[in-house]
Amino acid sequence: MGINSLIVYVHILIYGDSILKEWYDKINDALSVETLEEIRICVFGKKGILAAEFAKMKDLSGQEKGKLAKELNTHKAALMNEFTAKKITLQTEALMVAMKAEAIDVSMFSTSSQAGALHPVMETMDRIVEYFSSMNFAVKTGQIVEDDFNNFEALNLPKYHPARDMQDTFYFKDEMMLRTHTSPVQIRTMMASKPPIRMIAPGAVFRRDYDLTHTPMFHQVEGLLVDKEGTVSFANLKFILEDFLKYMFGEVEVRFRPSFFPFTEPSAEVDISCVFCKGEGCRVCSHTGWLEVLGCGIVDPNVFEAVNYKDVSGYAFGLGVERFAMLIHQIGDLRSLFEGDIKLLEQFQ
Ligand code: PHE
């Protein structure tokens, strides 16, 4: 019996028995915080025992009223004391049980362990960077929020060019935007240093696109090589890209197709023989036997003019890292690379 109960029994001796008596035992015998809460409502609630007892006062005469009030208030205080003490005891007990159940033995050996892995996009990016680093290309990163000059103007993408359309580019105010390619890094590098230049720009880029083969954010690696006039040729470009593509995809056929980019002239798109059907023709390569993987060309004189470079020649190229990752790992839907699905990612450990 707690000290409170003792006090109560003394009270009951003095003031006579009360229907409240049994509740002291109930409080004391409660086995859980939940039961105790039910008891609290029964005793102290608006429609509880105490309220009912107090209500009886209205039928009594002045003196009796006072006596009952005093008695009830004594019980009320004593019951509350009892209740509070019991609540603390039960809560402490519950906490101990929970702590014991949740305890971790840090000294114990684990029977299973899971190694993390690089995301396939990052792993592919690392391999690309590794190749060009081995060829003495410096790695430059630049900035994600770009201005009109670096993202478009200096790259010979004039005001009327469709790539500048609101449909394709995420704009901020004051002609600022999320970069649509990593080419602005090349402009910034040329503005900040003198030729010769040998660099790649890996990083995230942003376009308003979303379907099986496009996501609003994806990664590019672009490359730029600049040296004295007449020293950089298309043959140099062709050599390094063929070597690079064989490094990435193994023994594939490589072909260059004439194309157009505002910042290169002449320009080409580069295809590899389809890695799925080995050039036989399948759904992925639209039965052509070829997959487009790169854009490239000889740097347009207008670009050199914009950055104030004179008597130089150069080549540039650009590629989408996700596309490379999809072809290397044979992933069908580009969007699955960004869903963070553990089941997919586990396969790349
Ligand atoms: N900047 C081009 C793009 O984002 C890629 C590219 C770079 C093409 C350099 C040719 C030369 O599509």
Image: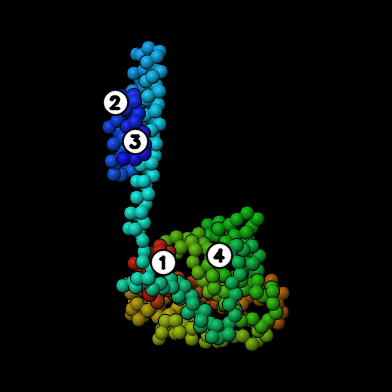
Q: Measured from the top left, where is residue 225 in percent x and y? A: 61, 81
Q: Measured from the top left, where is residue 223 in percent x and y? A: 57, 77
Q: Measured from the top left, where is residue 286 in percent x and y? A: 37, 72
Q: Please name the residue shown 35% across and 71% down the image.
A: 108
Q: Name the one closer to the observer, 128 or 98.
A: 98
Q: Secondary structure at mark 4?
A: loop
Q: Name the one closer to the observer, 24 or 6.
A: 6
Q: Can you tell me whether the CB of the residue at mark 4 lies under 8 Å from the nearest atom of ligand 1?
A: yes
Find disc 3 in the rendering and name its residue.
6
The quarter of the image holding the N terminus is top left
Q: Amino acid at mark 2?
A: Asp
Q: Can you tell me whether the CB of the residue at mark 3 lies under 8 Å from the nearest atom of ligand 1?
A: no
Number of the label disc, if any, that sits on residue 337: 1
The answer to whether residue 227 is above or below residue 86 is below
Task: Name which of mark 2 and mark 3 comes first in the sequence.
Answer: 3
Find disc 4 in the rendering and name its residue.
180
Q: Secondary structure at mark 1?
A: helix
Q: Can you tell me whether the CB of the residue at mark 2 lies under 8 Å from the nearest atom of ligand 1?
A: no
Marks 2 and 1, Cα distance to the nearest angstrom? Answer: 76 Å
Q: Residues within 10 Å of mark 4 (few under 14, many from 20)?
A: many
Marks 4 and 1, Cα distance to the nearest angstrom? Answer: 20 Å
Q: Secondary structure at mark 2?
A: loop
Task: Name which of mark 3 and mark 4 comes first in the sequence.
Answer: 3
Marks 2 and 3, Cα distance to the nearest angstrom? Answer: 14 Å
The mark lying in front, picked from 3 and 4, is 3
The mark lying in front, picked from 2 and 1, is 2
Q: Name the one closer to the observer, 136 or 216.
A: 136
Quarter assignment of residue 174? bottom right
Find disc 2 in the rendering and name its residue.
17
